[in-house]
């Protein structure tokens, strides 16, 4: 393992739970109270489908991490990376502005025997047209624990993650 790969791994972990599928749904309340996610960082992709939410957008909602993380959910990553969500992120929506905001993402990423835990707060997302797909604005996650090999913080570029509520 090369240490230089860790910034990408950490960024992947920091944003893995906030990604979204590439399809779109009509703007307005949804029926399923579910969210799909995807993020691609440094050639690795993490995805999940059908995580449970506490409400439908545009109502404020939280995402149940037990329906993202395995064994209750289907979060999976390409390559040798694994990730797990440590909190139930809360989302608020501003339909007039076409944005969403996440209060906090607390995630642990693992590669081989190295584990890194990161937290990002106040993440802003831009809605894709009139859909319930949201694409991230750039954000930085700060290391809260883990190996000395983990960088102190990682930045996820705008557009590297998306989420789709359905």
Image (cartoon, helix red, strand yellow):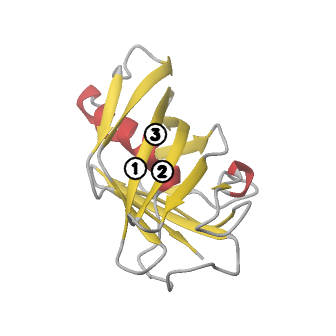
Label 2: which secondary element: strand
Name the residue at 47% across, 35% down: 121
The answer to whether the residues at label 2 and label 3 have Cβ atoms under 8 Å apart is yes
Q: Which mark is residue 122?
A: 3
Q: Residue furthest bottom?
A: 26
Q: Mark number for residue 124?
A: 1
Measuring from the top left, give residue 87's x and y in whole percent. 65, 39
Q: Residue at x 70, y 81 (%)?
A: 31
As helix, strand or loop, the secondary structure at mark 3 comes to strand
Q: Is residue 127 above or below residue 8?
A: below
Compared with 3, 120 (above or below) is below
> Label 2 vs label 3: CA separation?
6 Å
Q: Are marks 3 and 1 in contact (CB under 8 Å)?
A: yes
- Marked residue nearer the N-terminal end (2 or 3): 2
Q: Residue at x 49, y 74 (%)?
A: 132
Marks 3 and 1 sit apart, C-alpha to C-alpha, by: 6 Å
Q: Residue 103 location, x and y as percent?
A: 54, 41
On residue 101, the disc is 2
Neighbour class for label 2 at 10 Å: few (<14), some, many (≥20)? Answer: many
Q: CA distance from mark 1 to mark 2?
A: 5 Å
Q: Measured from the top left, where is residue 27 in percent x and y?
A: 50, 81
Q: Secondary structure at mark 1?
A: strand
Position of residue 43 in the picture relative to residue 143 (left or right): left
Quadrant including the C terminus: bottom right
């Amino acid at each position: 393992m090369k240490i230089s790969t860790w910034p990408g791994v950490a960024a992947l972990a920091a944003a893995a739970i906030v990604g979204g599928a590439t399809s779109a749904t009509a703007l307005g309340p949804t029926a399923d109270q579910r969210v799909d996610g995807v993020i691609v960082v440094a050639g690795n992709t993490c995805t999940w489908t059908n995580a449970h939410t506490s409400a439908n957008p545009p109502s404020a909602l939280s995402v149940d991490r037990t329906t993202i993380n395995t064994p209750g959910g289907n979060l999976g990553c390409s390559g040798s990376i694994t990730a797990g969500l440590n909190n139930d992120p809360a989302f608020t929506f501003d339909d007039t502005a076409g944005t969403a905001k996440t209060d906090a993402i607390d995630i642990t990423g693992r590669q081989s025997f190295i584990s890194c835990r990161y937290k990002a707060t106040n993440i802003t997302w831009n809605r894709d047209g009139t859909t319930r797909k949201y694409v991230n604005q750039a954000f930085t996650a700060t290391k809260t624990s883990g190996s000395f090999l983990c960088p102190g913080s990682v930045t996820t570029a705008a557009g590297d993650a998306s989420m789709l509520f359905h």
